[in-house]
Image (tube, rainbow, N blue to C red):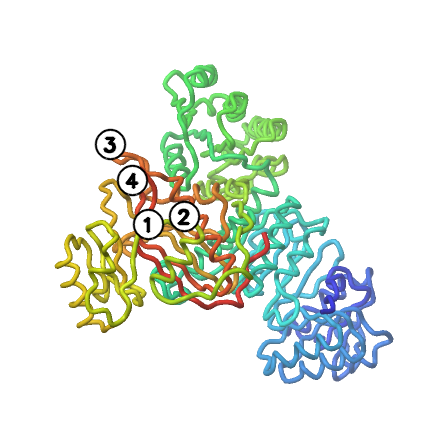
Amino acid sequence: MTARPALDVFRAPRSVAVVGASDNPAKWGHWLARGALAGRHRRPVHLVNARGATVLGQPSHPALDALPEVPDLVAFTVPAAALAGGVEHAVGLGVPGLLAVTSGVEDPAALTRTVRAGGSRLVGPNCLGLYDAAAELELAWGRFTAGSLAVVSQSGQVGLEIAQLAAARAVGVSRFVSVGSQLDVGAAEVLADLVDHDTTRAVALYLESYGEGPALLNALRALREAGKPVLLLTVGASTAARAAARSHTGAMTSALDVVDAACRAVGAVRVDTPAQLADTAHLLLRAAPVRGPRVAIVADSGGQGAVAADTAARLGLDVAEFPSSVQRDLACHLPPHAGRANPVDLDGAGERDLSAYASVPACLAAASVADTVVLSGYFGSYGRDIPAQAAAESAAARALGRLATDRDLPVVVHSMAEYTPALRELEDSGVPTFTDVERALRAVATAHRLTRQPRRRRTPRHSLSRRPPVGSGYLAARHLLGEAGVPFPRAAEIPAGTGDPVPAAASLSAPVVLKADWLEHKTEHGGVATGLWDPGALRAAYHDMVERLGPHRYVVEEMDRRADAVEVLVAARRDASFGPLVVVGAGGVRAELSRDLALELAPCSRDTAHAMVRSLRMAPLLHGWRGGPAVDVEALVDVVVAVSEVITDREDIAEVELNPVRVAPDGALAVDGLVVAGGGAARPAPS
């Protein structure tokens, strides 16, 4: 297949035309024409207006073929009914780049065919436009401040909100691309194009759909490797947005669980709101990297320090008590009864000498007890409220800036003031400021998540070409998963129509379990009988099931009676966007009630499987709860890795569910299993 042309034409086109240019400020054609003309010292700009009207004081042309040249990039701001003809005309002229802000296109597929048949590229339709600061290219609604944050958004207005919130935090935009309907150019390709975009240092991404899953992961991974952190805003937390699968596991996981797993796999981070994204970008682009979770809190109010400490802990940050040696050093800078353990209470030290606002953080930095220092309270207000103290406050602000730079340490200030000279000096010297302590600490916590290493994946051991077709029923699942390394109890088949089940169980040790082989979820249908100690009990249970459920195939299996076993769910499924996933969680018949799950992209490494197990709320049960023996976690990890490899290797499998896997001190046994065929078209993302 012929490679699609690159996106250079959207970076720095040699010439631009705006079709539908207007002199009316309420129309899209006005905004795009105004922006295009702002860059006319860099490139020829042509305005197309069907009536040949003067637009923004500039003459226009009635049609594209009336222009003196074929432009590199044409932006369409025309009604939906006119877009298809306009695009066909432009493609016929040989225009390489097309931008369509028009919404309500009647035949999107035909528009795509037209663009691709002519070898052109299209951004949109139904988008807000694009902007590139370095190229002085502005073809969008709104106004942009130049900077180093790239914004790529499926929703134009959400993207514009992110850009405006960032600008309010003194973070400008390097490139803005509203991808809209993504009929041709998609978000993944735009992100990949940012890897070598020199002015971009961080990326803000808003997506609502993930049809380009593997390509998107590759682009996000490349941005991470280029040192350009990606903050993702998305939707899908509601029940309506959840895509439940046939298995219990599919119903217990959401679209956001999958997106979060994808982010962990490539080192991106999901945020909850545009404001959180802008706050985090402000921290990332102004301060040193947040290299760990330890936070030192310094406040000039005991109450504000306590609020900050509680907030930090709730956000997953570490507000550990300082060693006694550090507390002794702090005593040199503080009044006798000041709190020194963390948080630090200045207890009036700052009021007596404003330099304490810098000397106390410097003491903590020298002791290397924190990955981030957060100063909370009144600082920034002195010069405003007491003009005679403005110079001293500014000196302390500059000292904090030097501390952050010299130590390569993030210093963050939460202030009760806003836009004061001292706070501007902090910002200018690399110390981000916030008017809300929760927003400050949430930005720190989000930035810390970006420093974590991506979850490692592994290449599956098996070869699809050597695997037999997926069978139906529990016995087939046992066979397939057993070959992959999943241990099961000994079992025997009771063929359909068997009169007496006892001979089939002759080689098995009592007690045994009787199961209806064909049922996916046996307990709900009365398709399982446990604790069958003698032939009579087995016969009675078998004849009862045959009478209720029919003369199908049944399975008799040795019952796992280990008293110290913990029941765990291990499962896998295939996501339409991101491919194979593996899940581990609390198992048994109450698994859906607890919803204690960890999910990652498959295949997973042993390290990742261990991390999944550690993250569970029920993890203490595995390590010896209340004096009980620890179970064989390594055996559980073996099962998780094996299932992750099966779902990756076998593209003809849609789902796998083992519930429960009974994990005891002497190993793990899967005592029920389900394999659902299907899903062959979904391919795993490249590792």
- Label 4, on which residue? 621
Which amino acid, by three-letter code, is at mark 4?
Answer: Leu
Q: Nearer the viewer, residue 546 or 8?
A: 546
Callouts 2 and 4 close, C-beta under 8 Å: no
Compared to 204, does 116 lie above or below? below
- Label 2, on which residue? 639
Mark 3 or mark 1, whichever is nearer to me: 1
Residue at x 36%, y 61% (from the top left corner): 674
- Residue 285, located in which quarter of the rendered image? top right
Residue 137: percent from left, percent from top: 73, 61
Q: How many neighbours does mark 2 have within 10 angstroms: few (below 14), some (14-19), or many (20 or more)? A: many
The numbered disc on residue 661 is 1
Compared to 669, does 25 lie above or below? below
**Circle 3: element type:** helix
Callouts 1 and 2 close, C-beta under 8 Å: yes
Q: How far is the residue under mark 2 from the one under mark 3?
A: 26 Å
